[in-house]
Each structure stands twice: as C-alpha cells, then as structure tokens.
Amino acid sequence: SSGINAEYGRHPTGRTMTVLEMEGLLGDVENIGPPMRWLDRTIAVVLVITTVFGTVGNTLSFIFFTTERARNRNSLYFKRVYQTINAVDLLICISLFPVIDAFIEDPDTQL
C-alpha cells in the first residue's frame, strides 16, 4: 500500500466506496440523455407568470404601505416591516429574470 487513502464515500448498501467506484457513478450521471426542452419552457412560463404578478403586486403593495399614514409607533413599526418584506420580495422577483433567460435559451447556441 502506498499510504494514500482511496476511500471516498459510502455505497447505498453502507460499504465504503473507492475513488474509482465513485468516478464510475459520475460517468453514469453524465449520460442521462438529451435535455427536455419542453420542461425548461414550461418552467420558464410558470416563472414569467409568477414574476409578473409578484413584481406588480409587490410594487403596488410597497406604494400602499409608503403612502399609508402611521397612527402610532406600533403601526409605524409594522408599516416598516411590511415595506421591508415587499422590497425583499420585489428584489427576488427581479432576480428571476436571468433564471428565466437560462430556461428559455437554447443550450446548443451557448458559447
């Protein structure tokens, strides 16, 4: 033995697997078949719909809570909490546009 520990992970049966066995498993994962373009497009459509509704809804809600007058310190606190929640959710909705683009883009035309 060269003193190199070849143990890498555990087999589903519980026995320890060597690096070569793990590489063999990775080779199987790489050959899972062609991408399902219809599934990518379906996910993209669902994301577009939810992003549009989320962006419009959060913008209107943020405007509402911005123009709402606080009657006391307690209502001012909750007004700020709701504004913060709306702002974070709006940023999440906006950040989905690159994800949508990745689902719509054809992987064969990438660089």
Image (cartoon, rainbow, N blue to C red):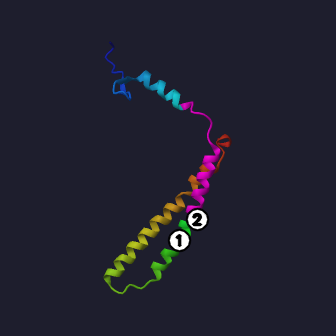
Label placed on residue 23: none
Identity of the amino acid at label 1? Answer: Gly
Q: Is residue 1 above or below residue 64?
A: above
The image position of residue 69, as x and y in percent, is: 42, 85
Q: Is residue 76 above or below residue 4?
A: below
Which part of the image, by quadrant, shows the C terminus?
A: top right
Q: Residue furthest right?
A: 109
Is residue 9 covered in magenta? no
Q: CA distance from mark 2 to mark 1?
A: 8 Å
Q: Residues within 10 Å of mark 1 (few under 14, many from 20)?
A: some
Secondary structure beneath disc 2? helix
User: Which corner quadrant of the image does residue 15 belong to?
Assistant: top left
* Of callouts 2 and 1, the N-terminal one: 2
Q: What main secondary structure does the magenta stretch of the protein show?
A: helix
Secondary structure beneath disc 1? helix
**What residue is rendered at 56% in x and 70% in y?**
56
Which part of the image, by quadrant, shows the N terminus?
A: top left
Q: Is residue 16 or residue 86 the one in the foreground?
A: 16
Dot 2 corresponds to which residue? 52
Is 24 on the left-hand or right-hand side of 37?
A: left
Q: Residues within 10 Å of mark 2 (few under 14, many from 20)?
A: few
Is residue 39 covered in magenta? yes
Is 17 on the left-hand or right-hand side of 111?
A: left
Label placed on residue 57: 1
Identity of the amino acid at label 2? Answer: Val
In this picture, which residue range is highlighted in magenta? 30-52
